[in-house]
Amino acid sequence: MSRHFFLILSFLLLFSSSLFSFFEDNGKEIAKTLQYPKQKHYVKVSVINPKLANIPISQTVTGITELHRKITVNTLSEGILHVKSFNGQLIKKDDIIATVSNAQRKNTITMLKSNIGLLHKQVLAQKSKFKSAKEMMQLGILSKNRLLDQQNLLEETNIALNKAKRELGKLELQESSSLVKAPVDGYVDSLIPDGSYVAYGQTLCRIIDTHVQIRLFVPPLFAKELYIGQKVKLKEQGSVTDAKIVAILPQSSDNLLNVIALPSQTLPIGMHIEAQIQTAQTRGWIVPKDAVVIVQNHPAVYIIKKNKATLHFITVEKDMIDKVLLTDHLQAEDHIVFKNAYMLHDGAIVEVLK
């Protein structure tokens, strides 16, 4: 019985050893099957170098277009007005608006010219007589009082001659100014009726300048940064027009300064516009907007060094649609990621595309 017992025990030990060996070998095969080869994964990125630039900082204000000026036209002559234009007419510079005629003035000019000729002859005769009287006095033939009388007569004749010349010059100036011309391009306004008698210096009409001006409303905070000749960018219906500041008015509207600017091209009257006035200039680095990522609610860029991405927080000074101006400490040789930047994290290994 003990022999049978040992045989059975030996059989069981042999069977269990084979079974253990089977599971051990099978486990090794399964473990080998579950082991995958390790592969390294790199994010492919493109890089750029930041560009150093000076960028103007502008203040956006509102404004309205209005008439630039109304120029008063005065007559420089006296007489009857003969109108050559009409109210509302568009005229060019030096076009004739009206003429002024004066028949009496023409007659006076003719008389003065004749009188001046006679006075000139009298002066010559008086000079000759004065010279003779002086010689006769030296010879003792003529008294000193007679010589003084002759001298006074010569001086009175000279005074009369000069007075006549001045009067003639004044009348001739009025006669030459009988043509009233437009000082600028514009529209005739408030023209007095034809046939009116006008005095020297009287207002004849007004010329409404065809040019317009822009009245800008600027916060007083920027008053110190405004100056005559300063350039302004006007935004009007999707287009941009240049303008230049010509006046900074002391009065204000709703606590805003009134600043007058002249546009480089004609604009309709009464148009509401936006304008940008350059108030300062800043220096910084320009990078594409796609290079900027938001990390922890703060803008940042990734700088690549030896194929490794380093997170660099930035300060955006100005947003310029497809690019931004940074005032951070960067270097011109920095490699900043602008393609696939959103796929990176600090310390990520990258492959830089050529």
Image (cartoon, grey):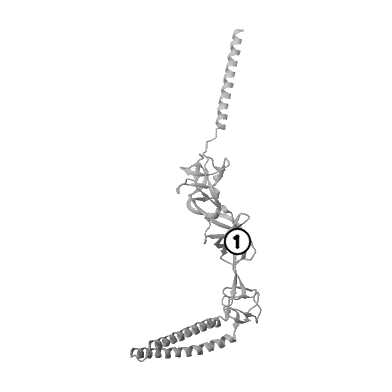
Residue 96 % position (x, y): 59, 79
The reply to whether residue 223 is visible in this rendering is yes
Q: Is residue 340 left or right of residue 192?
A: left
Where's residue 36, x and y in %? Answer: 55, 35
- Residue 240's x, y, as percent? 58, 61
Query: Would you identify the image quadrant in which residue 135 lies?
Result: bottom left
Secondary structure category for the residue under label 1: strand
Q: Residue at x 54, y 45 (%)?
A: 341
> Closest to the observer: 74 or 227?
74
Residue 257 versus residue 130 in the image, above or below: above
Depth check, front residue: 89 or 268: 89
Picture layout, residue 24 above or below residue 313: above
Q: Residue furthest bottom?
A: 141
Furthest residue in direction left, as rendered = 139
How crowded pointer 1 is (Cα within 10 Å; few <14, some 14-19, many 20+) is rated as: many
Residue 325, percent across and down? 52, 50
Quarter the N terminus occupies: top right
Q: Decide which of 326, 100 is in the foreground and name it.
A: 100
What residue is drawn where x is 55% and y is 54%? 222
Tell which of 80 and 48 is nearer to you.
80
Mark 1: amino acid: Arg
Mark 1 highlights which residue? 215
